[in-house]
Image: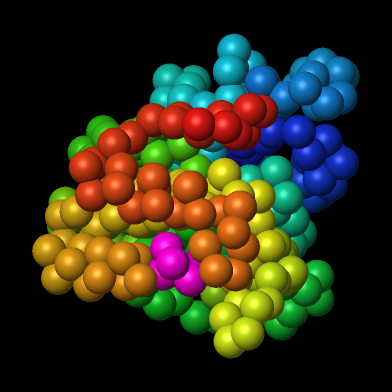
């Protein structure tokens, strides 16, 4: 069974180094480690050039930053073309526990006769010493951190939608897998340390609080959530009503986010996709 670890990175070389170290320390090593570099401008390129000397290490360099969605879509395609049967996907700030892949493989083999499983999910934790549980559960959605998808699933449902750029691409992909009659199984003994950066810092203005994120990201939060739920009329309608009000809350708590929240809401209703706001020059 060929399992490829797919890592998407952009300008976080120190986190990437820790991620690669964790992957190379796995009790069951990935057959290949494929890193997609989203046109990083820090020292990521130099670091990856040294790592390419390793036997199982490969790099796919993109000419521009296509975001998480573009990185995972291009990387997943590349991994499967290189012969991967399963692809273990993650961000560069993910730190898998030493036996994370071993536990995934154990359960992949255990459920190999069940042709209705579309993906296995690692369990995300915020600390390096959490206690694993011998438990497998059905999951409604997964994030692209520890998301392990088979080549057969990709053949059936396609690749992640590059048009999301960042946010909600994993939600849409999870829904697409399920709409094709396949299941998502979470393996609670396969642990990955992944801190929730959005929730670490908050902006507070009585009586509301919002994540302290760059204003341009607010555009994609609004737009992509609406895009990702378009096939579920009830959820989409409820979300549209919520966001109609929430854009004013964002504008109140963090005034500089107002144009991004309002434009994101409008573009989400229209179904606009693509990299509309460039992180390098986040101006309209």
Q: Which residue is depicted at the point 57% across and 44% down? A: 216
Residue 238 lies, with reference to residue 160, above or below; the image says: below
Q: Left of 121 or right of it: where is 139?
A: left
Model colouring: rainbow
Q: Left of 32 or right of it: where is 261?
A: left
Q: Which residue is depicted at the point 74% across and 56% down? A: 95
Q: Left of 251 or right of it: where is 179?
A: left
Instruction: Determine the image quadrant of residue 179.
Output: bottom left
Instruction: Please state which of residues 105 and 125 is positioned toward the viewer in this rendering.
Output: 125
x, y percentage for residue 194? 69, 62
x, y percentage for residue 262? 40, 52
x, y percentage for residue 19? 77, 46
Q: Is residue 29 visible?
A: no
* Type of secondary structure dominating the magenta stretch: helix
x, y percentage for residue 248? 44, 67
Specify start and end residues of the magenta stretch as a single range.
246-250
């Amino acid at each position: 069974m060929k399992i490829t670890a797919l890592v998407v990175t952009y300008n976080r070389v120190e986190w990437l180094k820790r991620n690669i170290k964790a992957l190379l320390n796995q009790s069951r090593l990935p057959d290949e480690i494929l890193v997609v570099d989203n046109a990083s401008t820090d020292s990521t390129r130099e670091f990856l050039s040294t790592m390419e000397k390793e036997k199982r290490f490969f790099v796919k360099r993109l000419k521009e930053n296509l975001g998480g969605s573009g990185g995972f879509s291009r990387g997943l395609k590349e991994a499967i073309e290189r012969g991967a049967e399963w692809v273990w996907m993650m961000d560069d700030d993910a730190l898998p526990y030493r036996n994370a892949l071993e536990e995934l493989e154990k359960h992949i083999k255990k459920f190999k006769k069940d042709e209705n499983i579309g993906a296995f999910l690692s369990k995300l934790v915020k600390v390096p010493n959490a206690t694993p549980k011998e438990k497998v559960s059905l999951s409604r959605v997964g994030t692209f951190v520890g998301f392990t998808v088979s080549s057969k699933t990709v053949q059936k449902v396609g690749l992640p939608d590059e048009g999301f750029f960042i946010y909600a691409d994993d939600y849409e992909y999870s829904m697409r897998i399920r709409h094709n009659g396949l299941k998502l199984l979470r393996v609670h003994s396969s642990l990955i340390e992944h801190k929730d950066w959005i929730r670490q810092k908050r902006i507070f203005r009585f009586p509301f609080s919002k994540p302290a994120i760059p204003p341009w990201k607010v555009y994609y939060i609004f737009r992509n959530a609406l895009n990702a739920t378009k096939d579920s009329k009830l959820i989409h309608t409820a979300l549209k009503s919520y966001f109609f009000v929430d854009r004013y809350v964002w504008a109140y708590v963090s005034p500089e986010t107002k144009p991004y929240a309002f434009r994101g809401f409008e573009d989400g209703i229209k179904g606009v996709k693509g990299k509309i706001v460039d992180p390098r020059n986040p101006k309209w």
